[in-house]
Image: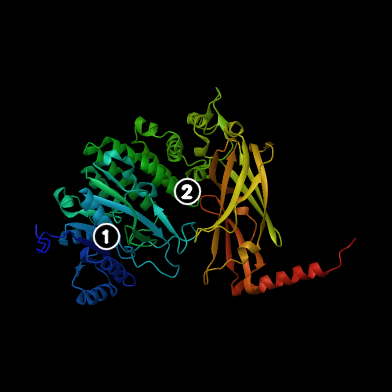
Amino acid sequence: MDPHAPHTAPVPRVGVVVIGHDDAAHVTAAVRSALAQGPVVGEVVAVDDCSTDDSVELLTRLAAGEPRVRVVRRRVDSGGCGSPRNTGLDRVTSPYVMFLDSGDLLPPGAADALLRAATDAGADVAGGLCVRREVPEQRRAPAGREAPEKGREGPEKGREVPWEAGLYAARAVYESPAQRPRLVHDTLCVNKLYRTDFLRDHGIRFPEGRFRHGDLVFSARVLAAGPRIALVPNRVYVRHVGGCADRLPSSPGRAGIADWRARTEASRAAYEILLAAGRKELAREARAKFLDHELRMYACELESHDVHHRRAWWTLTRAYLAEYDASDWEHRPTAPGCLVGRVVLASPEPRDLPRIRALASRPARLLPPYAHTPDGTPAWSAGLPGITLEPLLTRPVRFLPLTVDAELLPRARTALLRLRLHELYGRMAQAGPEALEVEWRCRATGRAVGPRTTVGLAAPAVGGAGVFWSAEVTLRWAAFAFRRMPAGGARVWDLRLRVRFRGGAYREVAAQARGGAELPRRCAVVGARHSVVLMEPYSTHSGALALRVAPASRGVMSVVHDGLRRLLHCHSRPQAH
């Protein structure tokens, strides 16, 4: 074979479908991130879903100077993400296709990494790591999109949270999804590359119109077709909070009961698709995924809603969980989501919401008091003795839903952190807790405020909630106040704990905020360059203790100065003897 002969074989190329609606501020950045993938991307199909802003004009101007870009404008607003994705899929001429939402980005090398994995393995689907990044607070979600939730403990600007990182820890190739049922848990469509003919030959499309959470259905259709799948550890997609996450202009985000109803409908559809295709193991895993992801995510927030929302959510959830059979509940009987689901199914009315919130959080916590059946078997509560927790007696200590509660008592220059580790059906005494490792970690950067502090646990004591082990740690406010702060923003510090047991075993836990809404009020501290910094302990929506550190605004400066003046005046007085 002459090495100088012209290479006539077609070179595999990728088509990227970019969808957007009223997102003129970001859509061209998304398109440019696709073009920046290099020659591996042969075409970018930009589908505008009947925008009313300048999106089409900006895209048209970009396409005029870039032959790889084609702009398709839908004349009727579909109200969702499925229809424009299908429109783009119909226009793609490349042998492989990827999907990109207007508010998100493809990192450099993403398409090349996925294409190489697919072609090397002869795979129909190639997937990589998606990371979720918080957009700046001033960056508004475009009209008709879900805005970033405020008041939640989601990632701050700059922090990237990986999605299903365990799946993408190393390169892997699977002849069939049945070889790795965990694939069911990655329901995103945007972190993957698909062989175009595979989707067309099997008639795999997104749900049309105002179908919320269509990714769940599309992913189930892909897995039901039994593709050969290649996975890579590369970071291939950056998803911005507030991006086109199944946009529905007329409905609210997770706060609304309509969204939960849509979640259950999409989850039911995914299960039925897998079951109809004979993928029974994947169908069972889809139900386990609902318990572990959807149910836990929404149950964490249930207590923050009004009574009408709670009852509607509870009724809807019970109706959906009633469709589960015995094998679904026995699949992972001690998993936190399974326990939450059993409590919901067993009670006709909302109950035990603080305990459900703690158990649904990550890591899971099972709050006291603890109950037993008449024969001594651990149970959820005296009111629900039928929900037995006997498997906890043999579960390894590193997986137990331990509860450590924390109380932060502010002082002038320091704060006292009081910690209590609660007994759990005798497992703590059996494991022998010896020490707590304490660390405050910045939510935005992932960096610790200082070295991890290890404190010994006192001998077990008995209190109102039963047996507990305790420890105390002193915090110096200066360690937080002199940290660099984002312009006009705040830093949130999460309390991370590790319980160490006899023999070297340990368990990572979060600290339950003792006192809840009655946490100490914020206090003012002098920070860098004599600025005033506000330190505010607060309880996150999952009940964990966190610390918010923010520069004092002008509106509170006079109050702070008056307080500092009074404090200095008191300290200058001669002390009575």
What's the residue type where badge 1 is placed? Ala
Quadrant of the rendering where the C terminus is positioned: bottom right
Secondary-structure class at tag 2: helix
- Residue closest to the eye, 317 or 439: 439
In this view, the residue farthest toward the top is 375
The residue located at (31%, 44%) in the rendering is 184
Is residue 272 visible from the viewing direction of this image?
no
Mark 2 belongs to which amino acid?
Cys
- Tag 1: Cα neighbours inside 10 Å, few (<14), some, or many (≥20)? many
- What scheme was used to colour the molecule? rainbow
Task: Say if 210 sits above or below 172 in the image.
Answer: below
Q: Nearer the viewer, residue 41 or 49?
A: 41
**Dot 2 or dot 1, earlier in sequence:** 1
> In the rendered view, would you say 28 is above or below 507?
below
Q: Which residue is mark 1?
A: 111
**Residue underneath mark 2:** 300
Local secondary structure at mark 1: helix
Residue name at image x 35 percent, y 68 percent:
142
Nearest the eye: 502 or 297: 502
Question: Could you tell me which quadrant the N terminus lies in?
Answer: bottom left
Mark 2–mark 1 Cα distance, whole angstroms, equals 36 Å
Q: Observer-nearest residue: 315 or 77? A: 77
Residue 416 position, x and y percent, is 68, 53
Q: Residue furthest right?
A: 577
The answer to whether 501 appears left or right of 9 in the picture is right
Q: Position of residue 47 (x, y in %)?
A: 23, 65
Point out the frontmost of discs 2 and 1: 1
